[in-house]
Amino acid sequence: MRTLRRLAIPVLTLALTAGLVFWAFPDGLSPARTLGVVLGWAGCGLMLASLLLMLREPRLTAWLGGLEWMYQWHHWCGMAAYVLLLAHPLALAGDNLATAPALAWATISPFNEGWPVWSGWLALMALMLGLAATFARRLSYRARRGLHAALGVGVLLGLMHLVLLGIDEPVAPILAVAAALLAWRGIRHDWGVGARPYVVGSVQAMGTDIVEIALTPLADPIDVTPGQFVLVAFSGGPGFRGCGEFHPFTVSAIDGSQVIRVAVKALGDCTRHIQSVRPGVAARVQGAYGSFLAGPLSAPQFWVAGGIGITPFLALLRAGPRMVPTTLCYLYRPEADAPFVQELTELAQADPKLSLHVIATGNQPPELTSWLPAAERLAGRECYLCGPPAMIANLRRVLRRGGVAPREIHFESFELL
Amino acid sequence: MMRYLYLSTTAAFWLLVAALWAGSVWHPGAAEATGAASARVISAAELATHATPENCWMAIRGSVYDLTDYLPDHPSRPSIIEPWCGKEATNAYNTKTRGRAHTQAADDLLAQYRIGTFAPATP
């Protein structure tokens, strides 16, 4: 079932792109002009798929293989569409290049054309700006997110370019769908109209720059299980004014009264500000997302957590004793960055199926071979990894080299811009 | 990976755009093509005999153009341009896209298809 769901996005993307190209495939044009038309429509199809994949309705994410999978494809489709749309005008110009270079330039020149061509150029500029902001790591998260919205403007301008060329069928309905998807994302998700209201019940400092926040629902609570994550935006309240941005946090506990707890580490401006949040502050919660730790319970499990990546495992351990033999390796750098160690030790002492290994790595990347079990001891185990991307990449490589099948390696990382 | 792809394709795009512009400056080419016009005079009656997409002439701004080969390349859908085959189409040519005229690039392109001078019927 999981494999089928992960196939949904590739199939949908292919159908959308191939369908548009098939519908618009021109007859009797020169090869260069045919290529230009095909590139434009293929880019349009990929861009539409990318728009659909930026929605984060929990039910939709479950159908399409999870939010992380959707966002990976959102990025791939958007990038592929950008490359094809860059090539589109060049191929059209190439049609006249051999016989009349001046005409080739005049085909795309913004200097002696009208709105049909200007809108195409503006669309490409907006896509260029939006992607530049996405990749500009020096910009703040808020600035990057704001400029990322230029991509939506680029999509609408690109479709207007087609309408101005006189190709209003089927572009008008596509334009309406694209505008609806952008509005849906903006209103329901970025403005948080679709989020559930919560209030901060308690805040506990868990170490340097880490707090664990309990959130109490004010209306229907979200449906969440251990291992999932939620998107939370903190608003105003007593002595605190939140930054209002939705950030992903893995749930670290689900209490019986439907109170959820999230651990927040100061990794940026907003999450640093959240360290000073107080009880009574309003919050909005979207989700829950993800299926990490939702795999089969038939086999022994091997868990590796790096730093704040302990939270999904903690949520599951807090929910009750393990049903299968489980080894948890918890890696941390300085002592102050190892929250929950005391509680984990107590949980391990009370649970005969849980084996806990707490490993201080210092400030250097961890030496995996010094503590990782031998390959024969990992055989037949389901491996779950959560932590910094570099740690996960190294672990996956070492585990695969040690003979662990890729289907037995599960990991989670956040790349949600 | 994505960042590298973005930077490399964007740089390649601007290099090729610059190359197209430079090519137009150093090897115009279009002027030669536009100079090959015929001095033949074509009446409205003769024009009207070329009124199908397979044999499409149009009179625009006093000249007659054989646009049969060009029709498949026209960006808009066929139903916009094909009804003008065999007719005087200056007004349509001057008022595309909600009243705007065609561009200089279109004028340059059109010149390549000129086959004669239009002689409208006298009253």
Image (cartoon, coloured by chain):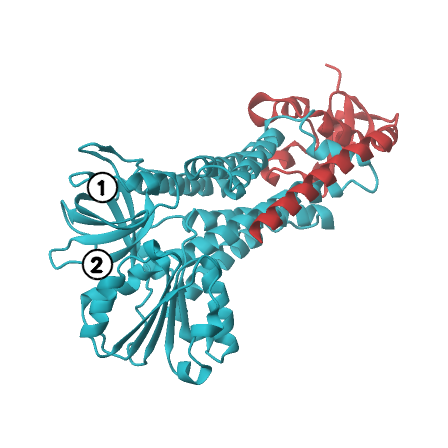
Chain colours: A cyan, B red
Give the image location of residue A210, x and y in percent. 30, 49
| Residue B56 left/right relative to A391 | right
Q: Residue furthest bottom?
A: A376
Q: Residue furthest top?
A: B123
Q: Residues within 10 Å of mark 1 (few under 14, many from 20)?
A: many
Q: Residues within 10 Å of mark 2 (few under 14, many from 20)?
A: many
- What residue is at 42 percent from the left and 78 percent from the top? A373
Q: Nearer the viewer, residue B65 or A19?
A: A19
Q: Earlier in the sequence, mark 2 or mark 1?
A: 2
The label number, if any, that marks residue A253 in the structure image:
2
Nearer to us: label 2 or label 1? 2
Q: Nearer the viewer, residue A176 or A379?
A: A379
Name the chain under label 1: A
Which quarter of the rendered picture does the N terminus of chain A lie within? Answer: bottom left
Q: Secondary structure at mark 1?
A: strand
Going by the numbered disc 1, the residue's amino acid type is: Ala
Going by the numbered disc 2, the residue's amino acid type is: Ala
Q: CA distance from mark 2 to mark 1?
A: 17 Å
Q: Is residue B53 visible?
A: no
| Residue A374 left/right relative to B76 | left
Q: Is residue A187 visible?
A: yes
Give the image location of residue B6, x and y in percent. 60, 46
Give the image location of residue B40, x and y in percent. 87, 27
Q: Secondary structure at mark 2?
A: strand
Q: Nearer the viewer, residue A401 or A97?
A: A401
Q: Kindly identify which residue carries mark 1.
A: A283
Q: Are marks 2 and 1 on the same chain?
A: yes
| Residue A184 left/right relative to A44 | left
